[in-house]
């Protein structure tokens, strides 16, 4: 977990140190179909499923074939193994957009999960963005 934090801090720190023109490149991640309140998305847990999931999106405006890396601040431990709550990678399409699945189990009800995404553009600049998802069970 600490290693992930250092990687993202390094990525953020490098963004200002590289003197390259990336044109319109950037990074914005968002939850495709979740409600956002005060900067936090809410995911309603579905008790009828083993996992509750939603799609996350990313916009880079940097064209196709950007390899995006995804991670979260929390993981699910089962059978001695840590499972990610988000797929670790996705690729952008020809418009610079990408999608990835995010899923949680019942123990995450009441938790707020921080999701991170980052990539390095062809010009050498690294971009990072994050969002928060609160898992609720109000039904």
Image (cartoon, rainbow, N blue to C red):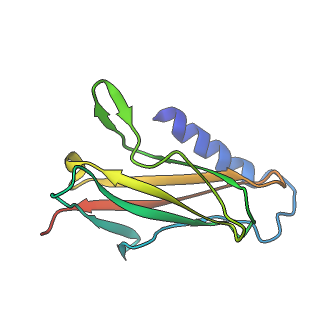
Residue at x-position 37% and y-position 43% = 74
**Quadrant of the image for the N terminus?**
top left
Residue 37 lies, with reference to residue 14, above or below; the image says below
**Quadrant of the image for the C terminus?**
bottom left
Q: Is residue 37 visible?
A: no
Farthest right residue in view: 20
Residue at x-position 34% and y-position 58% = 53
Q: Position of residue 63 (x, y in %)?
A: 75, 66
Residue 68 lies, with reference to residue 45, above or below; the image says above
In the image, is 99 to the left or to the right of 106?
right
Q: Position of residue 27 (x, y in %)?
A: 64, 64
Residue at x-position 30% and y-position 51% = 104
In the image, is 67 to the left or to the right of 136?
right
Work out whether residue 70 or residue 111 is closer to the camera in this orientation and state it: 70
The image quadrant of residue 46 is bottom left
Residue at x-position 84% and y-position 55% = 123
Work out whether residue 49 or residue 82 is closer to the camera in this orientation and state it: 49
Q: Position of residue 38 (x, y in %)?
A: 37, 74
Q: Is residue 49 visible?
A: yes
Farthest left residue in view: 139
In the image, is 121 to the left or to the right of 34?
right
The image quadrant of residue 6 is top right
In the image, is 112 to the left or to the right of 67?
left
Q: Position of residue 9 (x, y in %)?
A: 60, 45
Farthest top residue in view: 80
């Amino acid at each position: 977990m600490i290693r992930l934090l250092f990687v993202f801090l390094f990525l953020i720190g490098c963004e200002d140190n590289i003197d390259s023109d990336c044109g319109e490149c950037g990074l914005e991640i968002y939850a495709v179909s979740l409600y956002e309140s005060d900067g936090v998305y809410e995911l309603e847990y579905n008790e009828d499923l083993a996992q509750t999931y939603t799609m996350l999106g990313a916009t880079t405006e940097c064209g196709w074939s950007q390899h995006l890396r995804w991670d979260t601040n929390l993981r699910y431990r089962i059978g001695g193994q840590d499972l990610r709550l988000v797929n670790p990678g996705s690729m952008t399409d020809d418009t610079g957009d990408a999608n990835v699945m995010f899923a949680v189990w019942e123990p995450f009800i009441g938790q707020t999960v921080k999701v991170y995404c980052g990539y390095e553009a062809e010009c050498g600049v690294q971009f990072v963005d994050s969002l928060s998802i609160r898992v609720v069970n109000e039904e």
